[in-house]
Image (cartoon, grey):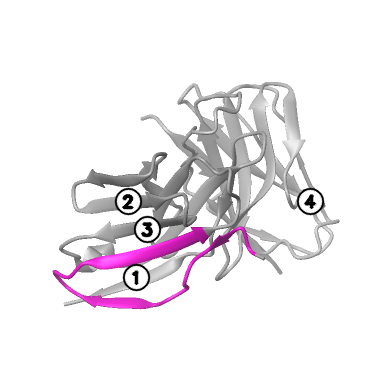
Amino acid sequence: DGGITQSPKYLFRKEGQNVTLSCEQNLNHDAMYWYRQDPGQGLRLIYYSQIVNDFQKGDIAEGYSVSREKKESFPLTVTSAQKNPTAFYLCATSPSGRAKGTDTQYFGPGTRLTVL
Amino acid sequence: QKEVEQNSGPLSVPEGAIASLNCTYSDRVSQSFFWYRQYSGKSPELIMSIYSNGDKEDGRFTAQLNKASQYVSLLIRDSQPSDSATYLCATISGGYNKLIFGAGTRLAVHP
């Protein structure tokens, strides 16, 4: 079964805790992305990675960290420094690691994070 | 000024009618445009991509792009209740493959 998997589907975090969201893909895509979606708003880019061992900050990277040690995996850590982390987190991939301006992005099923 | 703007809706249409969803964008150099459908609680799924001025048809869906007016639209013919969802417009911006999303238009198709 091919595609993008995200786990867990639901995650609850206490104040002051760091949590890590998993994103795995077997599409052999070079690029991977993390977005955050808040109710009634569009998706906002947190981090992206065009190739293994390289990643760049997106528009709202503060309070988040990532790693890209393997092509298939791009985990996102939500740190205690993120003031309002309750949101729907979406991982996406695209075939090309280099900007072509036309590359389509495909989304995983998402993780819904709630801060208690 | 938001980079991609959509009417939040809801847009309510009767079953069998044509639903017209609109999107405007501010970056004149944008070249690529995408329509995603998002059901409540689910992740976005790609419906259409369009890169050139004019119309692009795929089944019941037609995307229309007018770069001079900085306007992109999605038409859904023979609308079905299963089309009820939020439709997100997105364009690629910047020196890398960064998608800029609108906030989405909620479509409700009633029997």
Q: Are marks 2 and 3 in contact (CB under 8 Å)?
A: yes
Q: CA distance from mark 2 to mark 4?
A: 42 Å
Chain to which the residue tagged by mark 1 belongs: B
Say whether residue A91 is left or right of residue A109.
right
Q: Is residue B2 above or below residue B90?
A: below
- Mark 3 or mark 1, which has the lower sequence index? 3
- Mark 2 or mark 3, which has the lower sequence index? 2
Verify whether residue B87 appears in magenta. no
Labels 2 and 3 share a subunit: yes
Return the x and y of residue A104 as percentages of the image width and height.
46, 36
Q: CA distance from mark 1 to mark 2?
A: 16 Å
Instruction: Identify residue for label 2.
Output: B63
The amino acid type found where label 4 is placed reads Asn
The amino acid type found where label 2 is placed reads Ala
Q: Nearer the viewer, mark 3 or mark 1?
A: 3
Chain to which the residue tagged by mark 2 belongs: B
Q: Are marks 4 and 3 in contact (CB under 8 Å)?
A: no
Who is closer to the viewer here, B15 or A24?
B15
Instruction: Identify residue for label 3.
Output: B73
Label 2 residue SS: strand
Instruction: Identify residue for label 4.
Output: A18
Label 4 residue SS: loop
Say whether residue A101 is left or right of residue A75.
left
The amino acid type found where label 3 is placed reads Ser
Residue A108 in view here: yes
Labels 2 and 4 share a subunit: no
Instruction: Identify residue for label 1.
Output: B107
Question: Which quadrant is the N terminus of chain B positioned in?
Answer: bottom right
Residue A113 in view here: no
Q: Is residue A97 above or below residue A115?
A: above
